[in-house]
Image (cartoon, grey):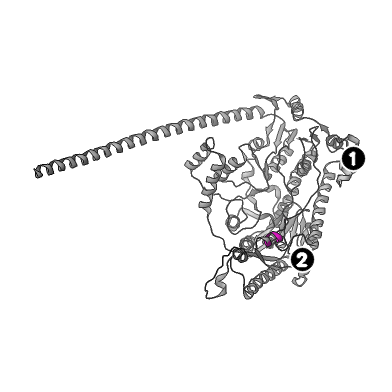
Amino acid sequence: MYPNNYNNNEDTSLLKKICKFLMFIGSALTFIRNFIGNLIMLLFFLVIFSAIQLTQSLKDTKHEEASYALNNKTPLVSFDLSGYISEKPLAFSEFEHIQKMLIQGDDIKFHELYKIKKALNTIKQDESITTVALYLDDMQPIPLHVADSIAKSIYELRKANKKVIAYSSSYSQSQYLIASAANKVYMDPFGEIEFKGLSLNSLYFKSFLDKLFIDPKIFRAGTYKSATEPFTQDYMSPHVKLENANIANHIYSTYKLKLKEYRQAFSQNDIPSSSYMLNKHLEATNGDMALYQLNMGYVDELLSSFAFEDRLIQEFGHLVDDNYRANAKSYEDYLSERLNPFETLKKEEIAIVYGIGNIVDKASSPDDFAPENIVPQLLKIRDDDKIKALVFYINSGGGSVTASEQIRRALSMVKEKKPVVISMNGVTASGGYWIATASNKIVATDATITGSIGVFGITFKANRLINEFGVYKDGVMTSDLANDDLLTPYTENLENVMQKSVDNIYRKFINLVASSRNIDAANYNTFAEGKVFVAPIAKNLKLVDTLGDLDTAIYEACKLAKTDIDSVKITHSKVDVPPIINNLEKFFFKGASAYIPDIVLVELLDLKKNLSLFKTDKNKVNLLISNIEDPKL
């Protein structure tokens, strides 16, 4: 009896196992079938989506080509300068292009200063172009030297008997400087030119840090090196106020002089210097700012944007596919049409390298002023026999001393083989000036801020903060040098070590400037000590050779290279951008923007970038100008 039952149980158990196995096989087959089916559906939708995108792209391309074909013979070129104007060639990776599209929208435009100027200079020689229309609405703030660089090229067009007209609903000071160089300036009846002047200010954190029980540790060389001031006091010191006031007054006086040069009205009428004066002027027009500025001759006529465009349409006709837009070719299309085939035949070149922004040890973007971005460009230029001279365009208040020195050494290697000219723009100070010492000649715009020859180091200690909440740090160490961190206060000896290091770099800085500029190092009180100068004063101190812009620097480079400016090709160097995302990821991010919130995609892109570019930075001694950035008008 028992054996039979045992056999039956065994048979049942075996049958169950077989059933389970078959069910597993069935489930697995169902999963695989569903997975393949879903994958096919997904691929199907991706193909459909890609086809739609491709079709739309082809339509847009044909539409643009049709519009371009129509405009090809128009004598009108339009410069729609809405968006951002970059003073250096853009080196966006596909990654950054997508990121900017998500953050700022697909309609945000990016312009390159050298292309704007190249188009204007080409038009000057082109008899088929009679008129240039400047659309200046929605321009982002730009510094004085950028606005004036465009204005100068526009003024040259006027002198070449080209007609230039400018329109904006309202004008910022930088927009208006560009417009002032035109023959005619138009503005909306409800607009205004925002003559505000210039302010230089900073936030001060001493009391805030005291409340947080955080102690800044400052190591400084240079009596007037004021970069650390916001962390040690709650107000601007008198000598920094005086220094900043002189800088602001010089820059704004330069701005007003340029307006007088470009527009006759400013020879008789100055800009109101205070709200009191402006209030008195507005009494005559019952507070109508646009009418007041029209009466003063700052603008030629008050028109709506529709009326302005209609006037152009009456003279030049309209687009074939848009009855409300004048028949004009954009300056971008004009440039692509007017590529000079003889330019590529020129055997000699002048190269321009751009260093803009804070000087950092490690780059997180192709735009960063970092050795890994700049040094390869310099070495490539050094070894290229076609390049006869280098112009290094700098707009930087300084940064890491080690990064500045790496770039200076590479620049010195270029200088051993060919002439090097520095073009100072905006702010070229401290670490920026350290780099500039490796040159044959220094050219600076008349509004450039330079100097700040001094050194500082800064770190923060938070031991009092954690102690306040009952947290303490303790342990053993072989030396106090091993315990240099955020939560351990410095010993007196360690503070002395840090100060000696800063003093040593300061001495090297003074000697570097003195030897390169042929100045007596014993007179360092006049040119160093962290003092900041505007370019004309810096020229008197022999820190600058010539006042002028990038065009002046190129001319000086040609002279040093003993070549003619008309026989050389001007090459604007860019960073070689490695791909951060592959084609599949590129497709995903572009396509997903229609379905996934932009903020989520931006975070995913940031994560991707940080994983790709993750590097550890150590504390560095910094060469920095005080708290002054390149002022925007």
- The one nearer the camera, 324 or 223, is 223
Image position of 314 with respect to 335: above or below: above
Q: CA distance from mark 2 to mark 1?
A: 44 Å
Q: Nearer the viewer, residue 416 or 353?
A: 353
Q: Residue pushed farthest front?
A: 1
Amino acid marked by disc 2:
Phe
The N terminus sits in image quarter? top left
Residue 527, which numbered label? 2
Residue 120 appears left or right of 385: right
Q: In the picture, residue 45 is in which quadrant?
A: top left
Examine the rendered structure and indicate whether residue 631 appears above or below residue 136.
Answer: below
Residue 500 covered by magenta stretch: no
How far across and how far down the image is residue 187, in percent? Answer: 79, 34
* Helix, strand or loop for the magenta stretch, by majority: loop
Part of the protein shown in magenta: 195-210
Q: Which element is circle 1 on? A: helix
Q: Residues within 10 Å of mark 1 (few under 14, many from 20)?
A: some
Note whether 522 is above or below 581 in the view shown.
below
Q: Residues within 10 Å of mark 2 (few under 14, many from 20)?
A: many
226, 473: nearer the viewer: 473
Residue 324 in picture, x, y percent from top left? 70, 25
Mark 2 falls on what kind of element? helix
Picture layout, residue 520 above or below residue 398: below
Q: Nearer the viewer, residue 348 or 62?
A: 62
Q: Amino acid at mark 1?
A: His
Q: Is residue 191 visible?
A: yes
Q: Which mark is residue 281?
A: 1
Rendered image quadrant of residue 451: bottom right
Q: Name the residue at 87% across, 40% down.
A: 265
